[in-house]
C-alpha cells in the first residue's frame, strides 16, 4: 500500500513539473518561435535550412527521411535502440524458458485442434487468403523501405508492415506455424543485426577521421560520384537496419504477449 502511495505522489509531482514546463513552450505554429524564425542575431531557423538545403546536401527528395536518418541520425538510432530495449524487456519479464521450448529447441507436437477444420470451414478461407496476402504485404513493405528516402515511407513504416504480415499469419492460422517460418532465434538475431547495421554506418566514418554518422565520408567505399550521393545511399542502409529491428521486435512482442511468454497456443 505504501509503495502505491509513493508511486502516486511521484507521478503527480512529475506531471506537475511537465505541465509547468509546457508554459515555456512557444505557441503552436508561432512563426516567431526559434524553430521557425531562428535566434535573433544568431543562426537561421532549422526548418528553413532543411527546406532550402536538404536536396543539395543529401540528394534525397524526401525531406522527412533526410532529417530523420541524416540530420537527426543520433536521435533516430537511439529511437531504434529504445524499440529493441522495449522488446527485450518484455522478453525478460514474460518469456518462460523450459528445456523443450528454449530458442533453437525442437517444438513440441501441436494439439490436434491446431489443424482441425471440422465445423470451422471459414478458417480455411481466412487462412488461405492471409497466406496469399502476406507475401504481397511483404513485397510492398520492402518497396516502402527501399523508396523511403525518395517517397513517403522508410524503415519504421516498412518494418511495421513486415512485422504485421507475420502477425497476420499467426492470427489467421497458428503461432506455431508462423514460428516455423520466423523462429524466435531468427527474430532475436535480426533485431540486434538491425542495430549493428545502423551503428556500422556511424562507425565507418570514424575510421577515416570524420564524425560519427557522417555518411559523406563513405563516398569512396560506396563508389559514389560525390559525398551527397554517399549520404543518400547510406540512408538506405540505415533504413534497412531500422526495418529489421522494428519487424523483429514487433513480432516478438506479439508472440510473447499473446502466449504469456510460452510461445504455445496464443490467440
Image: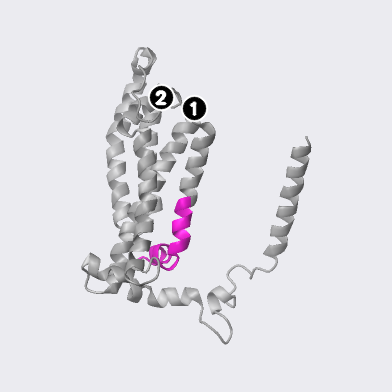
Residue 116 screen position, x and y as percent:
35, 14
Residue 4 screen position, x and y as percent:
75, 39
Residue 197 screen position, x and y as percent:
34, 54
Image height check: is 81 above or below 250? below
Camera sees residue 107: yes
Q: Which one is nearer the viewer's eye here, 39 or 184?
A: 184
Camera sees residue 154: no
Q: Which residues are magenta?
A: 61-81
Rendering colour mode: one colour
Residue at image point 45% right, 52% down: 80
Q: What's the distance in space between the residues labelled 1 and 2, CA to CA?
A: 9 Å
As drawn, which residue projects farthest toward the bottom? 41
Tell me the tag on residue 36. none
Element assignment for label 1: loop
Image height check: is 20 above or below 41? above
Magenta span contains residue 69: yes
Residue at image point 37% right, 69% down: 214
Task: Rate crowding at label 1 as few (under 14), some (14 to 19) or many (20 or more) other CA atoms within 10 Å.
Answer: some
Element assignment for label 2: loop
| Disc 1 + disc 2, Cβ < 8 Å | yes
Q: Quadrant of residue 131?
A: top left
The prevailing secondary structure element of the residues shown in magenta is: helix
Q: Which one is nearer the viewer's eye here, 170 or 247?
A: 247
Image height check: is 179 above or below 191? above
Q: Circle 1 sits on which residue?
A: 96
Magenta span contains residue 186: no
Residue 67 screen position, x and y as percent:
42, 66
Q: Quadrant of residue 209?
A: bottom left
Residue at image point 39% right, 35% down: 167
Instruction: Give the quarter of the figure containing the N terminus.
Output: top right
Q: Circle 2 sits on which residue?
A: 101
Task: Rate crowding at label 2 as few (under 14), some (14 to 19) or many (20 or more) other CA atoms within 10 Å.
Answer: some
Amino acid at each position: 500500500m505504501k509503495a502505491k502511495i509513493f508511486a502516486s505522489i511521484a507521478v503527480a509531482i512529475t506531471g506537475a513539473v511537465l505541465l509547468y514546463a509546457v508554459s515555456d513552450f512557444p505557441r503552436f505554429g508561432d512563426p516567431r518561435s526559434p524553430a521557425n524564425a531562428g535566434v535573433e542575431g544568431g543562426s537561421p531557423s532549422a526548418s528553413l535550412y532543411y527546406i532550402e538545403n536538404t536536396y543539395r546536401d543529401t540528394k534525397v527528395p524526401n525531406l522527412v527521411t533526410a532529417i530523420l536518418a541524416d540530420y537527426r541520425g543520433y536521435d533516430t538510432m537511439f529511437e531504434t535502440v529504445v524499440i529493441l530495449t522495449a522488446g527485450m524487456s518484455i522478453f525478460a519479464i514474460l518469456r518462460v524458458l523450459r528445456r523443450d521450448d528454449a530458442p533453437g529447441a525442437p517444438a513440441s507436437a501441436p494439439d490436434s485442434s491446431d489443424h482441425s477444420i471440422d465445423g470451422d470451414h471459414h478458417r480455411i478461407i481466412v487462412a488461405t487468403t492471409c497466406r496469399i496476402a502476406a507475401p504481397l504485404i511483404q513485397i510492398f513493405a520492402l518497396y516502402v523501405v527501399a523508396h523511403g528516402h525518395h517517397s513517403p515511407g522508410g524503415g519504421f513504416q516498412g518494418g511495421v508492415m513486415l512485422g504485421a504480415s507475420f502477425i497476420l499469419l499467426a492470427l489467421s492460422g497458428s503461432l506455431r506455424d508462423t514460428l516455423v517460418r520466423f523462429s524466435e532465434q531468427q527474430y532475436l538475431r535480426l533485431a540486434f543485426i538491425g542495430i549493428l547495421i545502423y551503428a556500422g554506418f556511424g562507425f565507418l566514418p570514424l575510421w577515416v577521421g570524420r564524425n560519427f554518422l557522417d555518411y559523406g565520408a563513405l563516398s569512396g567505399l560506396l563508389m559514389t560520384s560525390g559525398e551527397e550521393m554517399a549520404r543518400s545511399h547510406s540512408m538506405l542502409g540505415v533504413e534497412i537496419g531500422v526495418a529489421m529491428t522494428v519487424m523483429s521486435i514487433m513480432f516478438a512482442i506479439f508472440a510473447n504477449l499473446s502466449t504469456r511468454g510460452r510461445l504455445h497456443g496464443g490467440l
